[in-house]
Image: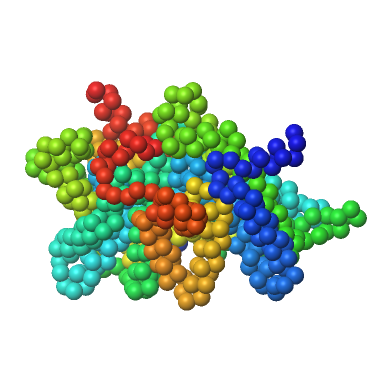
């Protein structure tokens, strides 16, 4: 039975496995073609879920404050470690993932109050500051926790169709990604926080004049972004070997998705994830993981030349 | 052009230290640096040359970030590209007939061409300040990931094995030929003097460039891109120019590093190596060449001293230094101390800090 390649992030330094999928074999019969199409859709959906889940937190912070959180990977690491700790302590996985997200969110709120809030008027310096945080957290964790923890193992097993096996956990990730987008839509559309947040995004000084607590909105948004990063770490923790540098394996995809998507999670990150997932899955199937990553970067270079404000900026301009 | 005119071109509004006292001090430091190999042992000379190798990448980042206002997190991509290019070409050509010099020039061309292509897509696409940072970092991390997986005999270019995670080894040192056709290896004190000469040439060359029209326009773009554009300048050309200069200088560091240590590894591009140039430049004072040069050498020295304890510990300390710098002295310490000594109004803090409305603030920055 052919095991499908996973799109999990390999932490820096780990070798990347190249799996020949032979999707492009022409001699397959009709039934085989159906299975191959199914396998390709599965892979696209898998990458899509990965991109949405890892990029959502980064995109929310960028959309609100205009800053890129370079410590995004470390919040992911924090979520993954807390989740693993809780599972080892006997907590069921969903609860453990929730605790992981909560811990990352709290860490985000603390760092926002202490450091990040001083940089809202200096977006480029904010990159350097959050990078300093990232360096301290990663290297501090290496000092305290050592180099690697084994994962708790992927639950739910797999189902087989024809010659292919599909991991149920990865299919569940697709559902989680869609639920996440839906949840963010509901949060930003129907809650007081969401209305205040959108008002702050559009015009912060006007929102403040109308009584919106802008400072608190920024703090909550940063906490939300950090919690979503922690959620990403928790969700992918069972599929990975944990190490303090594991965040690096997520950030390139997250950065790329935010650059292509632009400032809005729903009209930017979501369509960008679909397009990038299709490109990456196709290249990975033909040439392997590393070329899939390089393909993503080439796509980004072309997209920023054509649509410098990303999908969401382009959509907003068309609507205007 | 009289000699005074020529000397006047080293001075200008874009560089600190234009007076006689500054140049006298600089001459004194240079004199001491020339005499250094006579009094120090060979390990210290080689180690100082190693520090000098990195200064080119730092000066290049100062041009891009400090003067041009574009923050590149990916200088180590050009460093690694030039290092690998030098290695591949030098291994294939061998070190006879002065071929390593040819390899050095080819590596610099490759790094500059890559900076031109990457810079074209970013700058002519008109993406904002923070995006330049994350696109350059993404390219660097992907390049490092790619080189990490090139283990095994199938990954070779000619006679040069790429060797994946362990890196390329047995890269020839720089060598030239004398008039009789004998090979002269540039290592030990000779390499030290080569680095020193390059530092002087590049430092003075950049001073001339940044005090010329190019530098003035570049600083104008950093301060207010829209206004500069409305004044009729094609800001993209100037930013791309700065980006290519930065790529070239990072490439120079990379190729010289490969020649100095006779090896290059993917880890010299990936995190945390990619963070180092930012720290050197930010701590000294990114908006000035002299401050960058001093800051880089000081941070390298302190970092090496701390690494004796452990590398992780050294990185935590240096990360904290970066955070404190960017919070409290974003202009950098060398500039801050120089201002204090002169009784300047701005003092150590240099820039105003405080939580101001993000959207309002964004209008005044390079978005």
Residue B323 point in image, percent of width and height: 37, 59
Looking at the picture, the colour scheme in use is rainbow
Classify residue B188 as left or right of residue B220.
Answer: right
Residue that protrudes farthest toward the front in the picture: B343
Occupied quadrant, residue B298? bottom right
Residue A170 point in image, percent of width and height: 25, 53
Occupied quadrant, residue B313? bottom left
The reply to whether residue A140 is visible in this rendering is: yes
Residue A250 point in image, percent of width and height: 35, 54
Q: Tell me what residue is drawn at x 42 percent, y 56 percent.
A: B348
Front position in the image: A162 or B317? B317
Residue that protrudes farthest toward the right in the picture: B180
Residue that protrudes farthest toward the bottom in the picture: B309
Classify residue A317 as left or right of residue B87.
Answer: left
Front position in the image: A143 or B360? B360
Q: Tell me what residue is drawn at x 70 percent, y 67 percent.
A: B36
Q: Tell me what residue is drawn at x 34 percent, y 64 percent.
A: A137
Q: Tell me what residue is drawn at x 8 percent, y 42 percent.
A: A192
Residue A280 point in image, percent of width and height: 38, 43
Q: How many marks?
A: 0
Front position in the image: B3 or B353? B3
């Amino acid at each position: 039975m052919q095991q499908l390649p996973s799109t999990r992030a390999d932490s820096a330094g780990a070798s990347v496995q190249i799996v020949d999928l032979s999707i492009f074999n022409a001699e397959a019969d009709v039934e085989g073609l159906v299975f191959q199409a199914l396998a390709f859709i599965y892979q696209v959906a898998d990458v899509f879920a990965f991109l949405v889940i890892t990029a959502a937190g980064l995109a929310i912070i960028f959309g609100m404050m205009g800053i890129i959180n370079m410590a995004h990977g470390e919040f992911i690491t924090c979520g993954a470690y807390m989740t693993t700790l809780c599972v080892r302590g006997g907590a069921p996985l969903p609860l453990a993932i929730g605790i992981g997200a909560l811990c990352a969110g709290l860490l985000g709120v603390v760092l926002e109050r202490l450091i990040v809030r001083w940089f809202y008027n200096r977006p480029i310096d904010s990159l350097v500051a959050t990078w300093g945080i990232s360096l301290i957290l990663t290297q501090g964790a290496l000092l305290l926790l050592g180099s690697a923890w084994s994962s708790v193992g992927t639950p739910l097993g797999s189902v087989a169709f024809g010659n292919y096996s599909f991991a149920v956990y990865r299919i569940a990730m697709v559902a989680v990604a869609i639920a996440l987008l839906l949840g963010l839509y509901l949060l930003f559309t129907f809650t007081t926080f969401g209305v205040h947040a959108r008002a702050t995004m559009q015009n912060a000084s006007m929102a403040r004049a109308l009584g919106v607590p802008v400072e608190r909105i920024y703090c909550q948004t940063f906490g939300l972004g950090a919690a979503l990063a922690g959620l990403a770490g928790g969700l992918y923790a069972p599929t990975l070997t944990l190490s303090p540098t594991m965040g690096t394996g997520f950030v390139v995809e997250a950065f790329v998705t935010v650059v292509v998507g632009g400032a809005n999670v729903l009209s930017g990150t979501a369509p960008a994830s679909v397009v990038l997932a299709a490109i990456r899955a196709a290249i990975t199937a033909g040439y392997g993981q590393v070329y899939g990553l390089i393909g993503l970067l080439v796509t980004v270079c072309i997209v920023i030349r054509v649509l410098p404000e990303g999908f969401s900026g382009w959509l907003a301009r068309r609507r205007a | 052009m009289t000699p005074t005119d020529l000397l006047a071109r080293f001075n200008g509004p874009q560089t600190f230290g234009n007076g006689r006292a500054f140049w006298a001090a600089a001459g004194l430091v240079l004199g001491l640096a020339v005499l250094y190999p006579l009094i120090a042992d060979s390990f210290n000379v080689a180690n100082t040359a190693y520090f000098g190798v990195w200064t080119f990448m730092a000066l290049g980042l100062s041009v891009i970030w400090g003067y041009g206002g574009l923050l590149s997190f990916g200088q180590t991509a050009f460093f690694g590209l030039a290092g690998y290019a030098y290695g591949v070409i030098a291994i294939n050509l061998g070190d006879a007939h002065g071929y390593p010099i040819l390899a050095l020039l080819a590596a610099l061309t490759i790094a500059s061409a890559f900076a031109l292509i990457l810079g074209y897509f970013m700058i002519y696409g008109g993406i904002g300040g923070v995006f330049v940072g994350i696109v350059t970092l993404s390219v660097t991390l992907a390049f490092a990931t790619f080189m990490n997986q090139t283990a095994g005999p199938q990954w070779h270019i000619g006679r040069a094995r790429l060797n994946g995670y362990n890196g390329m080894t047995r890269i020839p040192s720089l060598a030239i030929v004398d008039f009789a056709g004998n090979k002269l290896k540039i290592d030990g004190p000779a390499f030290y003097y080569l680095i020193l000469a390059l530092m002087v040439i590049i430092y003075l060359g950049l001073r001339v460039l940044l005090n010329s029209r190019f530098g003035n326009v570049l600083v104008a773009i950093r301060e207010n891109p829209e206004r500069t554009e409305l004044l009729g300048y094609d800001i993209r050309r100037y930013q791309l120019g700065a980006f290519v200069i930065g790529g070239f200088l990072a490439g120079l560091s990379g190729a010289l590093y490969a020649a100095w240590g006779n090896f290059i590894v993917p880890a010299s591009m990936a995190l945390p190596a990619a963070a180092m140039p930012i720290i050197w430049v930010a701590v000294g004072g990114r908006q000035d060449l002299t401050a960058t040069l001093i800051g880089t050498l000081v941070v390298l020295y302190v970092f090496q001293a701390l690494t004796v304890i452990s590398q992780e510990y050294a990185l935590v300390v240096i990360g904290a230094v970066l955070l404190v710098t960017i919070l409290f002295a974003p202009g950098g310490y060398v500039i801050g101390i120089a201002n204090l000594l002169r009784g300047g109004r701005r003092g150590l803090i240099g820039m105003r800090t405080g939580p101001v409305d993000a959207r309002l603030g964004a209008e005044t920055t390079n978005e």
